[in-house]
Structure formats: structure tokens, C-alpha cells
Image (tube, rainbow, N blue to C red):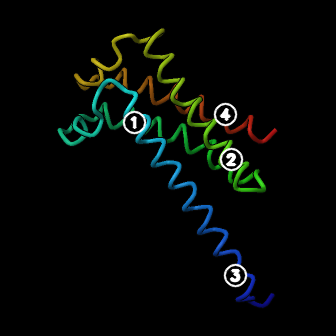
């Protein structure tokens, strides 16, 4: 097998576009997620609150799992955009449901640095993200 610079260039361009699109959507999701949460993750993390970091990291992981699935299974940018938006809506809805039904005091517990609440949200976010990603492959 001989290295084909033309094929590599086309593949590298597709990779760069997909990576930039996914990275951009992840940054938008992070900003929206931080905007809808009552607690200020950025300030809490800068102050050394590990619970805020764990909870936000879980939401990001729960988002990028279906995003990666969408990248692997879509054929066009508009289709990827639709799946990326749906993944974000599902992950944000997950936080809202957990906060309303399971842990109404979630934000206060994260602000206090309670790792049990942060880990719960992390794992719920991952479970939802894995299910979301699997459903995108069907």
C-alpha cells in the first residue's frame, strides 16, 4: 500500500471540518448548560469545588458521546447539526429533570462540594449519553 497524499489531504480536511464542528457544538453546549444551571460552575471550579467540576464534566461527556455517534453515522453537515442539537436538548432536559424530581437541592449540594450529588449527576448524564448515542445508530 502506497501513501496517497491527495487522499490524505481530502481525509485531513474532512477530519478538520468535523473536529471543528464538534468542538464548536461542544462549546455552545457547555455555555448553554452553564447558563441554565442555577450555580456558577466556572466560579465554583476556580474556587476548587471538585463537585462542580465532576458534574459539569459528566454533562460534557454525556453530550459528546452522542455527538461522536452522530459524527460516525451522519452523511451531511445539516444532519449532524440536527443530531447535535437533539443531543444537547436531551442532556439539558436530563439536568432539569434530575433537579426537579430526584434532587431538588442539587445546586445547593454542588455549591457545598457534595461529591455524592455530583457523582449522581455525572452517572445519570453518562447513562443518558450512552443511550442517546446508541439510539442514533439505529
Quadrant including the C terminus:
top right
Read off the residue under disc 2. Answer: 69
Numbered circles on residues, count: 4
Query: Residue 56 has which mark?
Result: 1
Name the residue furthest front: 78
Within 10 Å of disc 2 (Cα), the crowding (few <14, some 14-19, many 20+) is many
SS for callout 3 = helix
**Who comes first in sequence, dot 1 or dot 2?**
1
Looking at the picture, tell me which residue is in the foreground, 31 or 61. 31
List x then y, in percent, for residue 103: 41, 12
Contact, mark 2 vs mark 4 (Cβ under 8 Å):
yes
Does dot 1 land on a helix, a strand or a loop? helix
Q: In terms of depth relative to the viewer, which is nearer, 104 or 130?
A: 104
Name the quarter where the N terminus is drawn.
bottom right
- Label 3 neighbour load within 10 Å: few <14, some 14-19, many 20+: few
Q: Pick whichever, 135 or 16, lies toward us.
A: 16
- Rendered view: 21 above or below 25: below
Disc on the earlier residue, 2 or 4: 2
Using the numbered discs, state the Cα–Cα distance from disc 1 to disc 2 in whole angstroms: 20 Å
Dot label at residue 94: none
In the depicted structure, whether residue 117 falls above or below residue 104: below
Q: Which percent across, then down, holds residue 104?
A: 38, 10
Q: Tell which residue pokes out farthest to the left in this image.
A: 47
**Spatial distance from mark 2 to mark 4, Cα to Cα?**
9 Å
Label 1 crowd (10 A; few <14 / some 14-19 / many >=20): many
Residue 63: image x %, image y %? 55, 40
* Residue underneath mark 4: 132
Mark 1 near mark 2, Cβ–Cβ under 8 Å?
A: no
Question: Which numbered disc flags the more N-terminal residue, 1 or 3?
Answer: 3
Residue 8 numbered mark, or none: 3
Say which residue appears at 56% left-offset and 36% top-offset: 88
Amino acid at each position: 500500500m502506497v501513501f496517497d497524499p491527495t487522499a490524505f489531504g481530502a481525509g485531513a480536511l474532512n477530519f478538520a471540518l468535523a473536529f471543528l464542528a464538534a468542538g464548536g457544538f461542544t462549546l455552545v453546549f457547555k455555555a448553554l448548560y452553564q447558563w441554565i444551571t442555577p450555580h456558577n460552575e466556572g466560579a465554583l471550579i476556580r474556587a476548587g469545588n471538585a463537585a462542580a467540576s465532576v458534574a459539569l464534566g459528566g454533562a460534557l461527556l454525556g453530550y459528546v458521546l452522542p455527538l461522536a455517534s452522530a459524527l460516525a453515522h451522519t452523511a451531511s453537515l445539516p444532519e449532524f447539526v440536527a443530531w447535535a442539537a437533539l443531543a444537547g436538548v436531551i442532556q439539558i432536559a436530563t439536568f432539569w429533570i434530575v433537579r426537579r424530581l430526584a434532587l431538588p437541592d442539587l445546586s445547593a449540594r454542588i455549591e457545598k462540594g457534595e461529591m455524592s450529588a455530583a457523582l449522581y449527576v455525572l452517572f445519570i448524564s453518562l447513562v443518558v449519553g450512552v443511550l442517546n448515542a446508541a439510539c442514533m445508530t439505529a
